[in-house]
Amino acid sequence: AQSVTQLGSHVSVSEGALVLLRCNYSSSVPPYLFWYVQYPNQGLQLLLKYTSAATLVKGINGFEAEFKKSETSFHLTKPSAHMRDAAEYFCAVSVTGRRALTFGSGTRLQVQP
Amino acid sequence: DAGVIQSPRHEVTEMGQEVTLRCKPISGHDYLFWYRQTMMRGLELLIYFNNNVPIDDSGMPEDRFSAKMPNASFSTLKIQPSEPRDSAVYFCASSERGVGANVLTFGAGSRLTVL
C-alpha cells in the first residue's frame, strides 16, 4: 500500500520568505505524486503533479516540487511567500491501477506580514 | 464547465435522522470519488465509482453509510441513521478516464453537523 507523511502540521513564514512544505512517500511501485491546496471553506485544488516525466515539477502560483527517489521525498517550495498563499496544503499519492488518491494529514501555512 | 457540484453545502440534523448528500460530476468524467474530512482523521476515501459501478467501498465506515450512482451525472451518499460522529465535511471529486496519473477535481464540499 502507498502512503504519504507530511512533516509539520503548521508552518509559519514571513511574507517574502521561502516556503518549504515537506512530504515523504512510501510506495512499493513507482508513484504518482500530487500537491493540492485548500482555502477556507473550499474544496481542494491541484497545485502540481509528478508523473515521472521530470523530477522538478512546476505548478500554479509559483510553487514547485522536486521528486527525490533516494530520499522518497516530494517537498513543495516557493521562493517568496505571499499573503494569499495562506491555506492548507495536502500531499497525495497514487499508483498505476489505483485511481483514488491517498492524502497526507495536511500542513497549514500561515504567512505573517 | 461548472465543475463538480455538491448539495447541500451545509446540513444540520439531529441524531437518528437520514442524511442524503448529492453530487454532480464533471460531464465526461468516468470516475467519481467520495471523501470525508475531519480534524482527527484528515481526508479519507469512502468509496469510488468507475462508469457508475462501485470499485472500492472499503472506506465506508459501516452499514449506516451507502452510496449510489444511478447514472453518469449523479451520485448520492446516504447516512441512515446519522450519529454525531458523522459530523464532517464530505467531498465529491471526479476524474477522466485515462492512463497514468489521475487528477481529481473536487467539489466545494458538504458540511454535515449531527446534533
Image (tube, grey):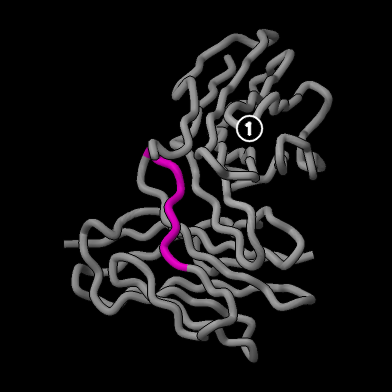
Give the SS element for disc 1.
loop
Quarter of the image with the C terminus of chain A in it: bottom left
- Write down the residue under mark 1: B72
Residue range corresponding to the magenta coloring? A41-48
- Residue A80 pos. (x, y %): 23, 75
State the predominant SS element of the stretch in magenta.
Answer: strand
Q: Nearer the viewer, residue A97 or B106?
A: A97
| Image quadrant where residue A93 sits | bottom right
Q: Give the residue drawn at x 39%, y 65%.
A: A11
Question: Residue A10 appears at what percent x and percent y?
Answer: 43, 60
Q: Count residues near mark 1 (Cα–Cα under 10 Å), then give few for <14, some for 14-19, many for 20+.
A: many
Q: Is residue A77 above or below residue B33?
A: below
Q: Residue at x 63, y 41 (%)?
A: B32
- In this view, A81 is above or below B52: below
Nearest the viewer among A73 and B54 is B54
> Does residue B85 appear in this view?
no
Question: Does residue A57 appear in the picture of this structure?
Answer: yes
Dot 1 falls on which chain? Answer: B
| The magenta stretch spans residue A78 | no
Direction left: furthest residue = A113
